[in-house]
Amino acid sequence: MRLTTICYIEKDGCFLMLHRTKKENDQSHDKWLGVGGKFEKDESPDECIVREVKEETGLTLTSYRLRGIMTFVSDVWETEYMFIYTADQFQGEIQPCSEGDLYWVKKEEVLNLHLWQGDVLFLRKLIQNEDFFTLKVEYQGEELVRAYEGISSVPS
């Protein structure tokens, strides 16, 4: 299994989005995501997100919060547990990212981007400022075949 974090940094009604175009053999190639990545040995979720945001953007988070936990099950990739964060304060200037290009995207336009179908489910919750949530999504290839919120099924 894989442990990861992702952060949607907020500023002026926008999320900072990463268009994944530069990394070879990237399962998320050409998709739009927040910034984040895999845990390193002995890291907590908070330590991971602060480090990953710094590495991918050059920004230092000064105010962030855990918003949800997502479980990804796939017939192709290993199961992934993702800790989903938002951040509303940071220091520094955005630096180029080795995985793609960073853009500020208005929250109301984010769902129009090329996203994983499961990401749409949690992004709606972030945009609507819902409280903490858990979701589980199941994929066959790149197709979302099932989604669960807590213990109940949700339409995909």
Image: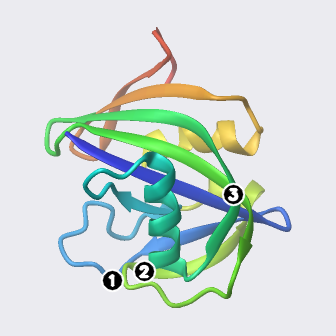
For image coordinates 69% across by 74% down, the residue present is 104
* Residue 9 position in % (x across, y down): 67, 63
Give the alpha-carbon distance from disc 3 to disc 2, as whole Å.
20 Å
Q: Is mark 1 on a helix, strand or loop?
A: loop
Question: Is label 1 or label 3 in front?
Answer: 3
> Badge 1: few (under 14), some or many (20 or more) residues near its Cα, within 10 Å?
some
* Residue 115 position in % (x across, y down): 48, 55
Q: Mark 3 points at which residue?
A: 87
Q: Earlier in the sequence, mark 2 or mark 1?
A: 1
Q: Name the residue under label 2.
A: 100
Q: Is mark 3 on a helix, strand or loop?
A: strand
Question: Is label 3 or label 2 in front?
Answer: 3
Q: What residue type is labelled 2?
A: Gly
Q: Mark 1 points at which residue?
A: 22
> Badge 2: few (under 14), some or many (20 or more) residues near its Cα, within 10 Å?
some
* Residue 48 position in % (x across, y down): 43, 57
Give the alpha-carbon distance from disc 1 to disc 3, as whole Å.
25 Å
For image coordinates 73% across by 31% down, the residue present is 130
Q: Is residue 133 above or below residue 108?
A: above
